């Protein structure tokens, strides 16, 4: 298929899908993705695959410069076919009753007998980076082979529950079980430098779709990064780059009820939220299916809060449709809402904070409140947030 026809408009995703990012050297590499499929380096700490991050910001860390100036955005589906080493993401995908590594393996139809954990059982000091005391550092080869292979899978979960990041656990698991590259779509883990990461195993092109690309060197300005974060500037067609023109549509033009939110409609809503154009925002907001628009509520709130457009945020929280706010506390939306509160705190905008929190639709963990408190010296905001804790 012609390259110009491959790129898709970005969609809003249900819970088991995600947006991820990857860097490459040049636009020719982008075109080659569609001409000759995805290519991998053939190696990596977690296996041969396509290495991506959930966070756009992490793609602008200085060390990313080696990977190239072209930033690609992908839609990844079927997250429940990944082994997820990040507990908060695993709970979001598998549910609170099935998020442990042991439960995930069951869901993924992987027999516990196939999981190699001998090293963790035999040498726990190595696992916790401690030196053994009065203990042999190596055990005889025949002793290792006599131990059962299915003892203590929960050791992985215990480690994940104590460590802030899961990259080391994921690396250890892959080293002991390299066969997972043949049985899973990939793995998800967190690292101190990149945040949440996703490695897509082969066939790479299975259940992953490119939805945009942009020339965005690591040294890009904060303004450009902010624009990309707000979903503007991405090239979603190799020949048509005037998607922004859709924001010039007459406000009285009739629109269909959208099954999903197309890129132009998102752009209109994001632009209206940024500029505080409440009339335009209301028109397009009301034309989109409630369950679909609920998936981008967090981002809309963040954009409005970042630009101090309280009327937009107030309008969102005034909606009475129960289907609309149902996903406000999910993994993706909640991160945007927390960042919206951070922005408001940095600007000493207590009115914005109250609009977001007073309705009771947002559920904040105590650690998030403490994080927001660090962003302000405004005593009124401090008192309000402390009262919210009680």
Image (cartoon, rainbow, N blue to C red):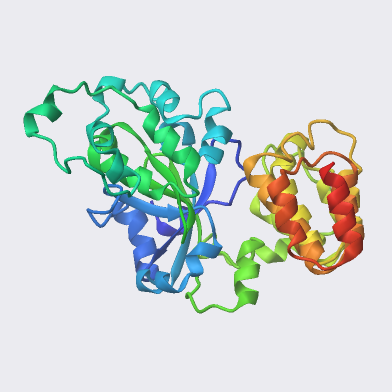
The answer to whether residue 207 is left or right of residue 324 is left
Say if residue 313 shows up in the picture. Answer: no
Residue 61 seen in the figure: yes
Q: Position of residue 381 (x, y in %)?
A: 87, 60
257 lies left or right of 9: right
Q: Residue at x 84, y 51 (%)?
A: 386
310 left or right of 172 in image: right
> Measuring 76% from the left and 38% from the top, which residue is drawn there?
257
Q: Name the residue located 73 percent from the left edge and 49 percent from the top edge.
A: 298
Q: Nearer the viewer, residue 116 or 277?
A: 116
Position in image of residue 177 (x %, y %): 25, 36
Q: Say which residue appears at 73% left-offset and 45% top-offset.
A: 366
Residue 348 place in picture, x, y as percent: 86, 67
Q: Position of residue 320 (x, y in %)?
A: 90, 35
Numbered-mark total: 0
* Front residue of this view, candidates 270 and 48: 48
Quadrant occupied by the C terminus: top right
Observer-nearest of 364 and 49: 364
Please indicate whether residue 92 sits to the left or right of residue 158 in the image. right
Location of residue 143 with respect to 24 vertically, above or below: above
Q: Is residue 166 above or below residue 341?
A: above
Closer to us: 131 or 254: 131
């Amino acid at each position: 298929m012609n390259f110009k026809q491959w790129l898709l408009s970005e969609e809003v995703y249900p819970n088991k899908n995600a947006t991820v990012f990857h860097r490459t050297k040049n636009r020719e590499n982008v075109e080659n993705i569609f001409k000759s499929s995805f290519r991998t380096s053939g190696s990596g700490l977690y296996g041969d695959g396509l290495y991506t991050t959930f966070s756009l910001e992490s793609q602008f860390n200085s060390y990313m410069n080696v990977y190239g100036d072209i930033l690609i955005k992908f839609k990844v589906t079927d997250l429940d076919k990944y082994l997820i080493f990040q507990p908060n993401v695993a709970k979001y995908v598998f549910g609170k009753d099935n998020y442990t590594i042991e439960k995930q393996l069951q869901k993924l139809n992987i027999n516990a007998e196939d999981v190699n954990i001998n090293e963790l059982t035999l040498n726990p000091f190595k696992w916790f980076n401690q030196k053994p005391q009065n203990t042999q550092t190596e055990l005889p080869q025949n002793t290792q082979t006599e131990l059962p292979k299915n003892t203590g899978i929960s050791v992985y979960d215990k480690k994940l529950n104590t460590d802030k990041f899961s990259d080391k656990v994921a690396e250890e698991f892959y080293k002991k079980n390299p066969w997972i590259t043949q049985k899973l779509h990939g793995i998800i883990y967190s690292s101190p430098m990149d945040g949440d990461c996703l490695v897509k195993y082969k066939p790479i092109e299975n259940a992953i779709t490119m939805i945009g690309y942009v020339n965005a060197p690591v040294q890009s300005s904060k303004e450009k990064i902010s624009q990309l974060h707000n979903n503007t500037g991405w090239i979603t067609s190799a020949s048509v780059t005037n998607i922004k023109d859709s924001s010039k549509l007459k406000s009285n033009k009739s629109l269909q009820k959208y099954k999903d939110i197309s890129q132009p409609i998102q752009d209109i809503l994001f632009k209206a939220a940024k500029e505080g154009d409440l009339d335009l925002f209301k028109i397009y907001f009301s034309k989109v299916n409630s369950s679909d628009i609920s998936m981008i509520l967090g981002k809309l709130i963040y954009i409005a809060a970042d630009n101090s457009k309280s009327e937009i945020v107030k309008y969102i929280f005034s909606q009475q449709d129960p289907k609309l706010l149902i996903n406000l506390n999910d993994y993706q939306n909640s991160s945007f809402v927390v960042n919206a509160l951070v922005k408001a705190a940095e600007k000493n905008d207590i009115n914005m904070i109250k609009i977001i929190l007073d309705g009771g639709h947002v559920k904040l963990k105590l650690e998030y409140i403490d994080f927001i408190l660090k962003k302000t010296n405004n005593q009124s905001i401090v008192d309000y947030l402390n009262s919210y804790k009680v």
